[in-house]
Each structure stands twice: as C-alpha cells, then as structure tokens.
Image (tube, rainbow, N blue to C red):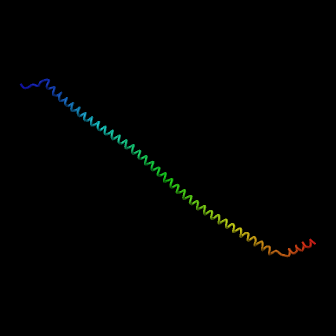
Amino acid sequence: MDKLPIPGAASARPMKDEFSSLKEAAAAVRRIRLSAQRELAQVRKMRADAQRYQRETETRARSEAQQLILRARLTTQREIEELIRQASDEIQKVLADIRVIRITAQEELAAQRKFTDAARLSSLSLTLKDMPKKPETKKKKQLAAARS
C-alpha cells in the first residue's frame, strides 16, 4: 500500500506555511512601518529645518530692509542738508547783491540831490544876476527919505 497521508500531518503543513507567511508578512509590515517612521522623522526634520530657514530668512530680510531704509533716510537727510546749504549760499549771494544795489542806489540818489541842489543854486544865482539893481537903489532912497 502506498503511503497514505496522515490526516493531521497534511493540515499542519499548510498552517505552518500560513504561519511562516504571516510571520514574513508581519516582518515586512514592520520593515515598512520602520521605513515609514524613518521617512516621517526625516520629513519632520526637513520641515523643522525649512521653518527655521524661513524664520532666519525673514529675520535677515527684515534686518536688511531696515538697514536699507535707514541708509535711504540718511542719504535723503544729507541731500536735504546739502540743498539747504546751497540755497542758503545762494540767498546770501542775492542778499549781498541787493546790498550792493541798495548802496549804489543811495549813492546815486545822493548824487542826484547834489546835482539838484547845484542846479537850484545855479538857477537862483542866475535869477539874482538878472534882477535889476535899480529897484534896490530906489528902496535905499525911499528908506533914506522916509527917515528924514
């Protein structure tokens, strides 16, 4: 007779195969789970690094922007001061020109007054020269006659 399979032995082998398949599957699941946990840890680390880099970049950008604004303000302030200085210099030059013009005008006015006074005197002396002297002698005679 051929060997007949033992009834309990046949069912044990497939269970053993299933059990080892389950063990292999569980091991594979553990490996996948460990791999996923490592990847998750790496992703979290990368995310934390990215957030830290973002904060550092934002801080650096704010700092550079503030420095740029400060430099712009200082440059603007220097330019304004330079423009004020130039305007002040120009105003001083205009005031000096005005003073010279005023002094010149006063001198010309004084000269005109002198010429006017001289012309009046000349006109008066010509008028006096042109007056007849006889009326003066008549007045003297009249005065002398009145006294007598």
Question: Dividing the picture into quarters, in which one does residue 86 lie?
Answer: bottom right
Frontmost residue, 6 versus 133: 133
Tell me the residue at 78%/71% (across/down): 124
Q: Is residue 110 above or below residue 15?
A: below
Residue at the extreme left: 1
Tell me the residue at 49%/52% (across/down): 74
Q: Position of residue 107 (x, y in %)?
A: 67, 67
Tell me the residue at 91%/73% (across/down): 144
Image position of 138 (left or right of 77): right
Query: Split into 4 quadrants, where in the image is the N terminus?
Result: top left
Q: Position of residue 84 (x, y in %)?
A: 55, 56
Question: Dividing the picture into quarters, in which one does residue 11 lie?
Answer: top left
Tell me the residue at 16%/26% (across/down): 12
Query: Split into 4 quadrants, where in the image is the C terminus?
Result: bottom right
Image position of 96 (left or right of 120): left
Image position of 58 (left or right of 140): left
Q: Is residue 18 above or below residue 91?
A: above
Residue at the extreme right: 148
Question: Dividing the picture into quarters, in which one does residue 97 lie?
Answer: bottom right
Q: Position of residue 145 (x, y in %)?
A: 92, 73
Q: Give the number of marks.
A: 0
Frontmost residue, 64 versus 10: 64
Residue at the extreme top: 7
